[in-house]
Amino acid sequence: MAENTKWVVSGAPHIHGSDSVTKIMWGVVIALIPAFLVSVYFFGLQALVLTLVTVASCLLFEFLINKFFFKRPCCLGDGSAMITGLLLALNLPSNLPLWMAIVGSLVAIGVAKWAYGGLGSNPFNPALVGRVFLLISFPVAMTTWPLPHALFGGSAVTDAITGPTPLAIAKEALKTGQTPEQIMSELPAYSDMLFGNMAGSMGEISAIAILLGGIFMLCRRIITWHIPVAFLGSAFIFAGILWLADPAQFMDPVFHLLTGGIMLGAIFMATDMVTSPMTNKGKLIFGVGCGVLTILIRTFGAYPEGVSFAILIMNAFVPLINRGCTPKRFANAK
Amino acid sequence: MNMKTFNIGGVHPDDSKLNADAPMQELPIPKQVCVMVSQHLGAPSQPIVKKGDKVKVGTVLTSNDAFLSAVVHSPVSGTVNKIADVVDASLYPKPAIFIDVEGDEWEESIDRSPEIKREINLDGPAIIQKIKEMGIVGMGGACFPTHVKLMPPKDAKAEYLLLNGVECEPYLTCDYRLMLDHAEEIMIGAQILMKALNVPQAIVGIEANKPKAIAHMSEMAKKFPGISVQALKMKYPQGAEKQLIKALTGRAVPSGKLPINVGCVVDNVATCYAVYQAVQKNMPLVQRIVTVTGPSVPQPTNFLARLGTPVSAFLEAIGGVPEDTGKVISGGPMMGKALANTEVSSVKGMSGILVLPEKQAHRNTVYPCIRCGKCVEACPMGLEPYLIASTSLAKAFDLTEKARVMDCIECGCCHFTCPSNRPLLDAIKLGKSTVGKIIRARNAKN
């Protein structure tokens, strides 16, 4: 039967689930929309322009590296470069000079991703490598935070006014001997922090917006609960222990959860599939490591914020965690 | 309803049970059949007929002295045309006996009357002997000789007989049809197996997507003391032996061990029906139900067909191959084998013929592994499919073995779930067969 030769002969299984890389990547993009909108709302057009620049430059570098270094067809379709661009933007102050953002994109895509072989091969989260590179290279620009528009408050402040983040304020004040109570009276109320009305990187300010995205990703099974819960839970407990031991020296745990990049880090950065462990047990260990390291750096380290460093350090442990945390076997007996 | 399932991994493909409630049809006997000489797992059989021999339905065609073996009977009456190698669903050439069909004359010893024979006269050893003589093998697909399962090693004791009515493969409906049409015979078959094994209890596992079968079999089970029906939550691969034992009894078969090591013997409902016919009616395994189905097939149907019927005859019976056909599969979509041509003939383990349209025939574009861990989550054996696949492709077979490749049941959950469309099962099967060879060579040396 001649006409039968055109039939496909391939190994089982012959059907495939509905999951795909593209679907996962676009899911993350959708989940980032609330945090992005909040940043545009508070920081204005600047935030939008910065995001467009990082996304465009990440896509461009991805394209150029594929075309000229690897000499293979473009792989922008998988959406991973766009996510790197988006996440990088959300980890930057909105008033960062655009050329610095482009440098950050080059480091994220060129060094952190493609130097290791591209999608799936990078040990460290590309967006975080880009951010940390900028933080170390341009410490002033990277820690000059615009204050959000006082749309909720009374006084008319403009984009131009900058100020430190609550974490930086607390760090400085604790050094000079102020008590947490005094510090808190100078800071926005927790309810303002929840909605994002404070200084900070574009995407990290609103806990509510980030949580919304997190819930969306949980429902779409893009992430599991393990890393965010272990990350935030361990940070809360560790900060709580310090606070209970000496409330005059340490900020309370709620403050630690609502300020800085911990929400963005726990839900979007640490859950990056490529750079986090495979098994649920491994994810829990990874999350706890991130949480404890974050609080350690924040309270005892030189920097006011430690989320990026904590995640990058834990990224380095992922191969070890994967080796140590094998899944639950069908029958434990040998 | 209290429903059970197995504990780790598994996926939920769309069950696609098309036209399952249509009545079973008898497929006309073709002009020529091609009977594969070996249709079981174990030592290959030898043909004992030669060209020109006259055979009837039920005439023994092959012999085999090995313990792990099964004989084959003629499914038709006629003349042996030739004995030659043909390419079967495995894509390897294997010996087959071609028989030109003349009439439909059965061996006199076979009882073809429709009435159900309920009284079991044979004792345990005689039942086992009869099952061996009648060439009964597991009809779920693995084709393990049934009589071997009934003779547990001295240190093991069977406590449960488990009947597999799960049919977790999408599209297939042959076991469903059988449970609706021949529930009582299945129950008697179970009683026969219980007697041979000397076990007091049998449980039939049926997935929740077959409520009619659950209701009908439960009703029937009331007449049979010791037999009960357990509804199971839908989850692939629940019909895999180890997963079914876990779901029904909570016991886990250890790595490298057999179901009997946890006191269980598992048989497909279709095997049970074949056992009934063999022991009560003296009828060898010469026919079976085959589901012919697919998204573009106008009338998906369950056919009762003689073994050795070419796939082309089945496809003719449904009105020819649909125009958009891109792939024809022997078995279900998760574990079935793609066929290269329609001259492949039906065998004891062929439960279905699935015709997939062109647009579903190809694999999706492969992306790099994004280390999402979904394969680990989906593996019902608790393995790390990504690790087994990558070590196997890197030819680091010592690592493949350490990653427990031999525990893999080749269910395809990892491959099915991978968002990067990576051909994980291809690589794992390569690793499994290579590591198997390495282990055998090592054992031979020691």
Image (spheres, grey):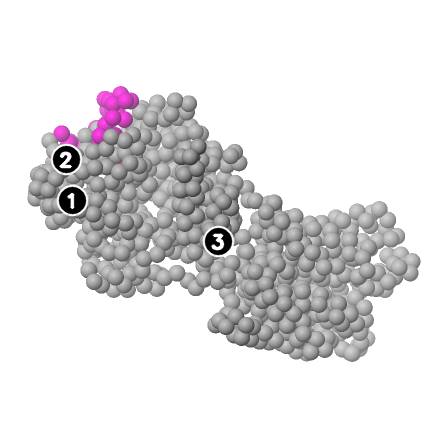
> Does B128 appear in magenta?
yes
Q: Position of residue B433 (x, y in %)?
A: 40, 45
* Segment colored magenta: B109-138
Residue at point 72% right, 70% down? A134
Residue B37 in the image: above or below residue B372 = above
Disc 2 designates what residue?
B59
Amino acid type at circle 1 is: Ile
Query: Magenta part mainly helix, strand or loop?
Result: loop
Q: Crowding near pointer 3: few (<14 within 10 Å), some, many (20+)?
A: few
Which residue is under mark 3? B394
Q: Secondary structure at mark 2?
A: loop
Disc count in the image? 3
Q: Position of residue B352 (x, y in %)?
A: 28, 48
User: Upstream in the sequence, badge 3 or badge 2?
Assistant: 2
**Mark 2 or 1: the one toward you:** 1
The residues tagged by marks 3 and 2 sit, at their Cα atoms, a distance apart of 50 Å
In the displayed structure image, the side of residue A142 where residue B300 appears, left or right: left
Residue B155 appears in the figure: yes
Question: Tag 2, which chain?
Answer: B
Numbered mark located on residue B273 in the image: none
Of the pair B372 and B155, the residue shown nearer to us: B155
- Of labels 3 and 2, the one closer to you: 3
Q: Residue furthest front?
A: B445
Residues marked 2 and 1, same chain: yes
What residue lies at 79% left-to-right and 66% top-to-bottom? A165
